[in-house]
Image: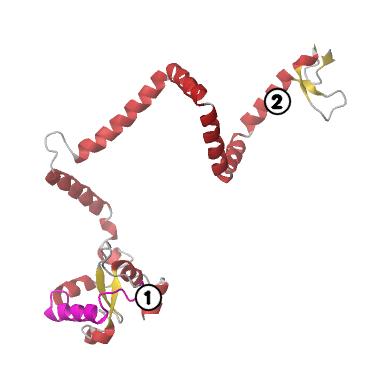
Amino acid sequence: MKQCSKCKKIKDYSEFYKEKNRKNGIRSLCKDCCKERIKKYQNENKEKITANHKRWHQQNKEKQNAKARQWYQVNKEKANRDHREWYKKNRITVLEKNKIYRQKKRETRLFLYPKKNKSKKHLVGRLRELALQNIRKYSFKSGEKHPNWKGGISKLRDKHSFADIRYKNWRKAIFERDDYTCQHCQARNGNGKEIYLEAHHIKEWIDYPELRFELFNGLTLCNVCHNKTKNPNKWIKKKVR
């Protein structure tokens, strides 16, 4: 028999946890007091414990997954039996969660495909409606208020360049000169690949109107590389220029 140092009750040795570092090999606190102490610590430090658990699982994710797979292969029948028993006990909560999930999925599907009309035309109409809602929502950032405003150059481009026969001939000549190959990543159509090529102006189209249709001011790029040149922070722009 031994007395617990916290609750001061005299209990049997079986009511105490073992500890090798002690002289008698038994802890000073009884099992009930130890459990109370652990619960108190867990309630006071919930965030800290969850953060430590998350960090540990992220660091040992592959190890844990391999261990779980190995355990499941050895104890497949036990795992399936336990899962069936758990499902019997928690069947109502599982069905409620599935019901909520299906209802949300059904609402989104009905928004895009209403019952009356499930055609593609109606889907396009619904998507157009969503686009208009976004335009109304962010209309305060359009035009001169937008951070990427460049003085309305899109109107000039539509008026003069891309419908012009000179631009079409210039674009075709650039592609033929560069053998229909991206001059940065060397990508080209063929071998099951479909690559969209674009003619890039080395000197900006809006800043140098006299060089718009000069061959030395053109370069063949794929659409991926061409998009990178539009961002001044990307290194590709420096390389092309």
Q: Where is residue 57, by image quadrant?
A: top right
Secondary structure category for the residue under label 1: helix
- Identify the disc placed on residue 37: 2
Residue drawn at 54 percent across, 29 percent down: 74
Three-letter residue code for mark 2:
Arg
Residue 76 higher or lower than 219, as above or below: above
Location of mark 1 (residue): 237
Work out whether residue 226 or residue 203 is closer to the camera in this orientation and state it. Answer: 226
Precedes in sequence: disc 1 or disc 2? 2
Residue drawn at 47 percent across, 18 percent down: 85
Q: Is residue 229 magenta?
A: no
Q: Position of residue 234 (x, y in %)?
A: 41, 71
- Identify the disc placed on residue 145: none
Q: Residues within 10 Å of mark 2 (few under 14, many from 20)?
A: few
Q: For the magenta stretch, what is the residue range?
A: 161-185
How is the structure coloured here? secondary structure
Q: Where is residue 10, by image quadrant?
A: top right
Three-letter residue code for mark 1:
Lys
Residue 180 visible to the viewer:
yes
Work out whether residue 105 or residue 6 is closer to the camera in this orientation and state it. Answer: 105
- How many numbered marks have been drawn onto this rendered protein structure? 2
Residue 223 higher or lower than 70, as above or below: below
Q: Is residue 191 left or right of residue 18?
A: left
The CA span between labels 1 and 2 is 63 Å
Q: Residues within 10 Å of mark 1 (few under 14, many from 20)?
A: some
Identity of the residue furthest to the right in this view: 23
Q: Quadrant of the N terminus?
A: top right
Work out whether residue 12 or residue 86 is closer to the camera in this orientation and state it. Answer: 86
Q: Where is residue 54, by image quadrant?
A: top right
